[in-house]
């Protein structure tokens, strides 16, 4: 199976072109999970499947289906969407300005240069503006956060020092806490660096671990910060991997911008 390895600000993905449907029945949950295993296969945070647009009248150039590294399907991935836009242009499916479908809706993307891609997200939704979560035995004080949906749910928690060791102890428990909903949520610890810059760490569901970056989380954090009066838009985001992104709102809605590039292409004997 032919694939392209992509990276977006530290998130890495396996991208495959299934516009012709040749991989139908091949991309199963178990096969995707095997390919995403680090050290034993290609290794990635998730897999991007390019398919033909499902609605010929939607104006979309193609459809993106996103799978987490456990093989489970997710509605959206911000950095994955930006990598998919780059991949679609490389495959000749779309140009530098494009529209694509995801399970979260329609998105517009713009290829800026050899590295940068801007993606307009679905409008963020504030699910819960004031969450207070107690983790008995893990932390003495409750965590105060907001729950935001940017295509997938995020629990955003603003803290003075995200490198104080607390994230490692509690992120997995917060991710599955009942207050975040039936399926849980991604967890973002956010540290302010003025009004137009933040540091950020993310624990992603489906990966079940900390990732080097998270695009939907970046937008969730900036959206929450603006709503709480803590941040201005646009805002610079420095994730764990150190490759910066930016997020903000313009007349077309909330956007995410940053690195999205191909690393290498190859063929795998899996699945």
Image (cartoon, rainbow, N blue to C red):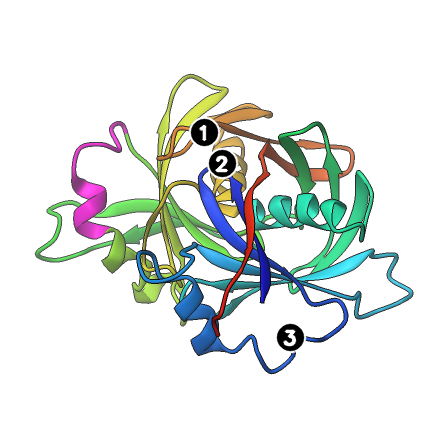
Name the spot of residue 244 as percent of width and height, x first.
48, 27
Query: Which residue in the structure is indicated by mark 3?
Result: 23
Question: In the rendered structure, does residue 108 fall within the stretch colored magenta?
Answer: no
Q: Residue furthest bottom?
A: 25
* In the image: residue 134, left or right of residue 6: left
**Are the residues tagged 1 and 2 within 8 Å (C-beta)?**
yes
Query: Which residue in the structure is indicated by mark 2?
Result: 9
Q: Considering the numbered disc 1 on the image, is that residue within a helix, a strand or a loop?
A: loop
The mark nearer the N terminus, 2 or 3, is: 2
On-image quarter of the N terminus:
bottom right
- Tag of residue 79: none
Task: Name the mark nearer the viewer: 2 or 3.
Answer: 3
* In the image: residue 19, left or right of residue 260: right
Q: Is residue 217 above or below residue 181?
A: above
Q: Residue furthest left?
A: 137
Query: Which residue in the structure is indicated by mark 1?
Result: 243
Q: Nearer the viewer, residue 54 or 271?
A: 271
Q: Nearer the viewer, residue 159 or 46?
A: 46
Task: Name the mark nearer the viewer: 3 or 1.
Answer: 3
The mark nearer the N terminus, 3 or 1, is: 3
| Alpha carbon separation for disc pair 3 and 1 | 33 Å
* In the image: residue 84, left or right of residue 267: right
Q: Is residue 259 above or below residue 34?
A: above
Q: Considering the numbered disc 3 on the image, is that residue within a helix, a strand or a loop?
A: loop
Where are the magenta residues, as a range? 160-170
Instruction: Estimate how packed mark 2 is, as few (under 14), some (14 to 19) or many (20 or more) residues with alpha carbons within 10 Å.
Output: many
| Alpha carbon separation for disc pair 1 and 2 | 5 Å
| Alpha carbon separation for disc pair 2 and 3 | 28 Å
Q: Nearer the viewer, residue 136 or 89?
A: 89
């Amino acid at each position: 199976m032919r694939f392209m390895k992509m990276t977006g600000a530290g998130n890495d993905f396996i991208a495959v072109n299934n516009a012709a449907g040749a991989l139908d029945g091949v991309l199963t949950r178990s096969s995707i999970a095997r390919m995403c295993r680090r050290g034993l296969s290609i290794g990635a945070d998730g897999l991007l499947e390019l398919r033909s647009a499902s609605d010929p009248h939607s104006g979309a150039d193609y459809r993106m289906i996103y799978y987490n590294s456990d093989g489970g399907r997710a509605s959206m991935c911000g950095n994955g969407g930006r990598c998919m836009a780059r991949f679609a242009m490389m495959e000749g499916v779309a140009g530098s300005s494009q529209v694509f479908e995801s399970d979260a809706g329609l998105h517009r993307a713009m290829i800026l240069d050899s590295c940068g891609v801007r993606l307009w997200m679905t409008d963020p939704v504030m699910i819960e503006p004031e969450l207070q979560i107690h983790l008995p035995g893990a932390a003495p004080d409750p965590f105060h956060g907001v729950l935001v949906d940017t295509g997938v749910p995020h629990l955003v928690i603003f803290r003075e020092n995200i490198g104080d060791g607390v994230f490692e102890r509690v992120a997995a428990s917060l991710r599955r806490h009942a207050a975040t909903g039936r399926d849980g949520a991604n967890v973002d610890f956010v540290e302010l660096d003025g009004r137009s810059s933040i540091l950020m760490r993310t624990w992603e569901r489906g990966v079940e671990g900390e990732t080097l970056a998270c695009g939907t989380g970046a937008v969730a954090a900036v959206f929450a910060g603006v709503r709480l009066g803590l941040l201005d838009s646009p805002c610079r985001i420095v994730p764990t991997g150190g490759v910066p992104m930016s997020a903000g709102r313009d007349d077309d809605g909330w956007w995410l911008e940053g690195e999205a590039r191909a690393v290498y292409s190859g063929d795998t004997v899996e699945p």
